[in-house]
């Protein structure tokens, strides 16, 4: 088959759009594409006007209201989501929350996937009388501190984290939903947009940008091949594959990690390849000592679970840096009253390298929230936890079925930990978009710039201006900012993609032109052939027009 011959796709396997990944980002994109009146980015005032227009749109100035509010939405049947974990949304999210036994999200109420309303989760909690499942994020809104107290605190603290000004009007947002409430709210979004039948359990192995024919439809789109041998086709595709990249495991000091019986990485826990404190393995009374390595919230959450387990004798938690306490994964000023100032400063940076630097500054490596800081301090006080900060593992060896670890604390002597039965690495994943196997063909055929593992996309989160492959979540961080890998980024990214695609639909620039077959008896090139060449990119519109004029 030549490059100009179309790949035949069964009409049942053809959709307008295919989303790779059914996590929070995949759900946010699917819901946004099916939403006609996206309101989740509007302020309260805009929202009121928006509802007013929605009710009275037919009586108001059509030109203005149409420009702003009439998007051409997609229907659930136009979309397909492919996910390796399950044929239901959020499988990865649920699994990471159950592995770490997390009772409440880290993020506030306005971090969610619902495109229709920024206050949607608060309304959902109240409507369902589930206010008790919200946990207040204290010391953020300023409720507990008078201005005088804040001033005193600011002069005492080096950093102003935790006492950033928040618009008092927004105080209700600074609660965190319970894991169950958030899950149920997401399922309500799935139901509202009728997305439940549009997700299949399979793994995408490759994406190619090719000429496609499906029934009478012909044009250039994506051929998506999966592990089960299926071939799907679509006009646009969205990569929402989450945090995949280079996992920091094994460490250079320990090339043989004895996986899965001696150690594992948190990704193995989240993918359920290994169970945390596996009951079979830890039922052996001689196996009781564990080490958790990593300075973020996940390691703290695992340490808390282990300390509560009476079958575990000793828990050692190793932080390479000092303890950083933050409510969220990034500084508060990326979330609170002045977030737009921060975000616009980010968007205006001239190079990807500068954006990458600003992202790192905002996230500052791993941090834990005050809730888990208090919990761990209590375990240290009770003698359940050995919390080693500013400490690095410098040597790790496997001897007679257990680990010997050498650790070095800044400016002090090396320490040893002996007879360690299991090491859990919560050492994170480095972005490395080029390592994703299913994107190899795209990188080979349509290379784009990559900065420190992050792709350089267009502002619409598109591969480039010609190719309608979009990315959301961690892979869109250079365009969306430091919150891209979180729920905030899921909704922001979905908004950019959704707006762009719906707008193209509205302008008539999205659909492929249907091609009718004109047969020539004299053996000359038919209009069909020429249009194929146009869609395949081997001729341009002027050449086609010229051809049609002559014929
Ligand atoms: C323990 C923990 C707690 C967290 N808590 C919060 C929080 O409270 N608030 C917050 O904002 N953020 C939180 N985060 C960050 C969180 O991971 C992100 O907010 C969010 O889940 C990322 O969503 P995603 O859709 O990009 O990725 P995921 O949820 O990982 O979903 C990606 C999906 O794509 C699938 N996939 C990947 N490759 C393929 C392929 N080739 N073919 C088909 N499917 C594929 C995966 O199987 C997966 O199901 C937390 C993270 C962790 C680890």
Image (tube, grey):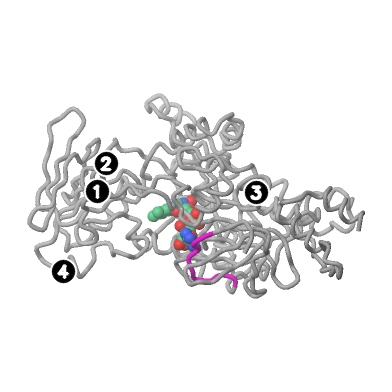
Which residue is located at x 12 percent, y 55 percent? 402
Left/right of residue 5 with respect to residue 319 in the rendered view? right
Q: Is residue 435 left or right of residue 417?
A: right
Distance CA(mark 4)–CA(mark 1): 26 Å
Q: CA distance from mark 2 to mark 4?
A: 28 Å
Q: Main secondary structure of the magenta part?
A: strand
Query: Nearer the N terminus, badge 4 or badge 1?
Result: 4
Mark earlier in primary sequence (2, 1): 2
Residue that appears at 57% across and 51% down = 471
- Residue nearest the observer in this picture, 289 or 201: 201
- Mark 2 — residue? 319
- Nearer the observer: mark 2 or 1; the answer is 2
Q: Earlier in the sequence, mark 2 or mark 4?
A: 4
Comparing labels 3 and 1, the label whose residue is closer to the camera: 3
Magenta highlight on residue 201: yes
Quick one: label 3 or label 4, which is nearer the N terminus?
Answer: 4
SS type, badge 1? helix
Find disc 3 in the rendering and name its residue.
496
Q: Which residue is mark 4?
A: 283
Q: Element at badge 3?
A: helix
Closer to the camera: disc 4 or disc 1? Answer: 4
Mark closer to the chain start, 2 or 3 = 2
Between 368 and 21, which is closer to the camera in this rendering? 21
Q: Residue at x 45, y 27 (%)?
A: 151
- Region in magenta: 198-206
């Amino acid at each position: 088959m030549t490059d100009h011959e179309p790949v035949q796709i069964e009409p049942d396997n053809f959709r307008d759009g295919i989303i790779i990944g059914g996590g929070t980002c995949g759900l946010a994109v699917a819901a946004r594409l099916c939403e006609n009146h996206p309101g989740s980015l509007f302020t309260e005032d805009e929202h009121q006007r928006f509802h007013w227009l929605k009710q009275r749109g037919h009586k108001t100035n059509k030109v203005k209201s149409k420009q702003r509010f009439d998007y051409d939405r997609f229907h659930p049947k136009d979309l397909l989501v492919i996910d390796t974990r399950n044929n239901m949304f959020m499988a990865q999210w649920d699994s990471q929350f159950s592995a770490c036994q997390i009772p409440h999200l880290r993020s506030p109420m306005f971090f969610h996937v619902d495109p229709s309303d920024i206050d949607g989760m608060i309304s959902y909690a109240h409507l369902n009388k589930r206010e008790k499942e919200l946990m207040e994020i204290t010391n953020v809104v300023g409720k507990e501190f008078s201005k005088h107290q804040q001033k005193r605190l600011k002069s005492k603290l080096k950093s102003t984290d935790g006492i950033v000004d928040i618009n008092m009007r927004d105080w209700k947002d600074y609660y965190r939903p319970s894991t169950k409430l958030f899950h149920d709210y997401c399922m309500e979004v799935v139901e509202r947009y009728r997305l439940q039948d549009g997700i299949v359990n399979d793994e995408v192995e490759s994406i190619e940008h090719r000429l496609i024919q499906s029934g009478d439809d012909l044009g250039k789109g994506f051929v998506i091949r999966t592990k089960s041998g299926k071939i799907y086709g679509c006009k646009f595709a969205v990569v929402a594959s989450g945090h995949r990249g280079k996992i920091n495991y094994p460490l250079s000091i320990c090339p043989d990690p004895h996986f899965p019986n001696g150690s594992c990485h948190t990704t193995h826990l989240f993918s359920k390849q290994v169970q945390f404190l596996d009951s079979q393995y830890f039922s052996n009374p001689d196996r009781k000592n564990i080490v958790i390595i990593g300075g973020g919230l996940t390691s703290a959450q695992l340490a808390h679970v282990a300390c509560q387990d009476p079958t575990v004798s000793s828990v050692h938690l190793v932080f390479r840096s000092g303890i950083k306490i933050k409510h969220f994964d990034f500084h508060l000023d990326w979330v609170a009253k002045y977030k737009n100032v921060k975000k616009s400063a980010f968007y205006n940076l001239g190079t990807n390298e500068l954006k990458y630097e600003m992202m790192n500054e905002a996230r500052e490596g791993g941090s834990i929230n005050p809730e888990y800081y208090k919990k761990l301090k209590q375990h240290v006080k009770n003698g359940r936890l050995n919390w080693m900060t500013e400490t690095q593992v410098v040597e790790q060896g496997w001897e007679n079925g257990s680990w010997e670890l050498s650790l070095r604390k800044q400016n002090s002597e090396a320490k040893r930990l002996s007879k360690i039965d299991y090491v859990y690495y919560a050492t994170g994943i480095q972005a490395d978009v080029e390592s994703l196997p299913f994107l190899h063909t795209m990188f080979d055929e349509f290379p784009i710039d990559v900065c420190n593992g992050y792709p350089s996309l267009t502002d619409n989160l598109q591969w480039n201006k010609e190719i309608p492959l979009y990315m959301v979540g961690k892979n869109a961080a250079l365009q969306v900012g430091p919150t891209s890998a979180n729920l905030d980024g899921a909704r922001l990214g979905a908004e950019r993609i959704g707006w762009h695609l719906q707008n193209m639909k509205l302008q008539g620039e999205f659909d492929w032109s249907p091609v009718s077959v004109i047969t020539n008896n004299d053996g000359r090139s038919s209009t069909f052939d020429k249009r194929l060449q146009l869609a395949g990119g081997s001729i341009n519109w002027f050449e086609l027009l010229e051809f049609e004029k002559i014929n």
